[in-house]
Image (cartoon, grey):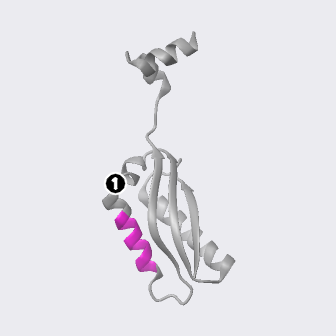
């Protein structure tokens, strides 16, 4: 058994179907590359519409369970065992500069 960690950037993904399809492709590439059973740790990064889903523990567990179910019964498996979210919300810097707080003041001062 081999342990691997892969990073998936959610930037540009519009829905969870896109994420699950990319995960399937990455697992298949690992299976072909190593030809050994792999326990897989996923690290999600980036910004975008999927950020809210990635930060929810229940959704990540659901993705994990669905991905594990795909691997059951395969002689060479790539079994995800955890999903870590390092994603960030999308920030519109133009709108952020208009707020009257420390960060908005800093951004306006930086621009000047």
Q: Is residue 63 magenta?
A: yes
Disc 1: which residue: 56
Range covered by the magenta-colored residues: 61-70
Q: Is residue 44 magenta?
A: no
Q: Residue 46: image x %, image y %?
A: 52, 46
Of the 4 image quadrants, the one containing the C terminus is top right
Residue found 42% across the figure and 50% down from its top? 50
Magenta region, main secondary structure: helix
Relative to 5, 52 lies left or right: left
Residue found 62% across the figure and 74% down from its top? 30
Q: Is residue 37 visible?
A: yes
Q: Is residue 10 visible?
A: no
As rendered, which of 40 and 73 lies closer to the eye? 40
Of the 4 image quadrants, the one containing the N terminus is bottom right
As rendered, which of 111 and 94 lies closer to the eye? 111
Q: Residue 52: image x %, image y %?
A: 37, 48
Residue found 57% across the figure and 86% down from its top? 76
Q: Quadrant of residue 110 in the image?
A: top right
Element type where label 1 sits in the image: loop
Q: Residue furthest right?
A: 33
**Image: 48 above or below 6:** above
């Amino acid at each position: 058994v081999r342990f691997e960690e892969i990073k998936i950037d959610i930037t540009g993904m519009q829905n969870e179907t896109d994420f699950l399809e990319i995960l399937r492709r990455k697992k298949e590439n690992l299976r072909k590359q190593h030809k050994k059973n792999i326990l897989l740790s996923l690290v999600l990064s980036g910004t975008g519409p999927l950020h809210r889903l990635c930060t929810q523990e229940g959704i990540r567990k659901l993705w994990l369970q669905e991905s594990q179910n795909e691997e059951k019964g395969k002689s060479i498996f790539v079994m995800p065992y955890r999903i870590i979210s390092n994603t960030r919300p999308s920030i519109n810097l133009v709108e952020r500069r208009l707020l009257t707080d420390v960060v908005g003041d800093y951004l306006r001062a930086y621009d000047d």
